[in-house]
Structure formats: C-alpha cells, structure tokens
Amino acid sequence: MEKGSPQELEQRLALSRPEDTLRGFFFTGALEVVRGLDDDMALRRCIEAAGGSRFMAFFSYPVGALNRLLYAAAWVLSERHGGFEPAMQRLGHRVAPEYLESGAGRVLMMLAGGEPRRMLNGFPSAWRTSVRHGECSVRWTGPGSGVVVIKGSTLPCDYLVGAVQGLFETSQVADVKATGRQVSLSETEVEVSW
C-alpha cells in the first residue's frame, strides 16, 4: 500500500471508532494552511472532507474527519511542499501555535520552564488534554534524546512528526530534530534529539 494513497486513508478510517475524537484546533490549523494557498476549489474540497469549516478550538470532533481533511489537504499541498510526506509534516507543524495559545499549551510551557527534557516529559499530559483516543508516552534514549510513543491513534506519522517539531520550534525551547517511524497504522514513534 502506497503512503498517502486513498487506500491508506480508507484503512485509517476503518480503524477509527466513533468515540475517537480530538480538539477542534487540529482542524483549524489544517484549514489555515489550505487557506494560505488562496485556492477556493482546494479549500472547498478540504472543507467537504472535514465535514465543515467552523470548528471550536476545545470542542471534540471525530478523528476520522481530521484524517479525511489531512489527506485532502496533503494531496493539495504536495506539489508546493515536495510531496505527500513534507506536506503532511507542514500540516502537523501548523497545529503547534494553535495548541500553545490554549490554556493547556500555556501550562505545558510553564511546566517546561525552557527545558527540552521537561517539555518532552509533558507530552503525555498534552496528548490527554487534546486527544480522546490512544495513548502517548515518552521513552528516554539519552540525556538529549527520547522517543514519543503514540499507540492507538490513526493520525499519520508525518503529521505527528510535524506536530512534535512544531511544538519545540514555536515554543523556542530547543532546536530539535524529529524523525518518525510508522510501526503500524495505529502506532507511531517520533524520535527527538537536541
């Protein structure tokens, strides 16, 4: 199965349960990236894929709807961003400012206190306040490196890599390198080092 294909999306949708939800700012971040293209037809396709254009930041919406939006947006953005994977990372990166402006994001920043290790330790709590499916944990691999392990979520690996990278870059806590490994369609590992 080809990465970024309609078949991959269908498999992700098949694994999603109705109770698997996440906050509206994931949708608004992705739609903002598409709005930046200034292409009304592309924006309409993405709004249709998402099931609407207005999302309240801290209301919960189905993860399946976000996956449909992410794939539609990444297909539209692929040409400009060098392919499906970089486009998906761009979409993930864009959710970081949305999250950090929220109350939960400000708490994460306060608890991190400018320390990358404490920031990474806060990711499981950040996940629980934003996502209502799956689980997030951190495994340390060295004094300046760790792995964010996300199980039970159908969000694409490249999207999650972009989100992790974006949280560090937007917060300016550390200059990090994030790379991902899709263990399965519902498990991702994001390696982070600084």
Image (cartoon, rainbow, N blue to C red):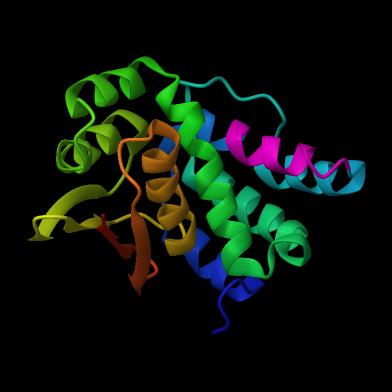
Q: Is residue 122 left or right of residue 94?
A: left
Image position, residue 185 (x, y; %): 40, 68
User: Is residue 54 a member of the stretch shown in magenta?
Assistant: no
Q: Which residue extends farthest top?
A: 103
* Figure label count: 0
User: Camera-side residue: 168 or 42?
Assistant: 168
Q: Residue 128: which quarter of the image?
A: top left
Q: Which residue extends farthest bottom?
A: 1
* Visible residue check, residue 19: no
- Magenta region, mostly helix, strand or loop? helix
Image position, residue 85 (x, y; %): 57, 67
Image position, residue 68 (x, y; %): 62, 53
Q: Quadrant of the N terminus?
A: bottom right
Q: Quadrant of the C terminus?
A: bottom left
Q: Is residue 137 above or below residue 102?
A: below
Magenta highlight range: 28-38
What residue is drawn where x is 15% and y is 52%? 138
User: Camera-side residue: 193 or 90?
Assistant: 193
Q: Is residue 55 left or right of residue 159?
A: right
Q: Is residue 162 above or below residue 26?
A: below
Q: Is residue 62 above or below residue 102?
A: below
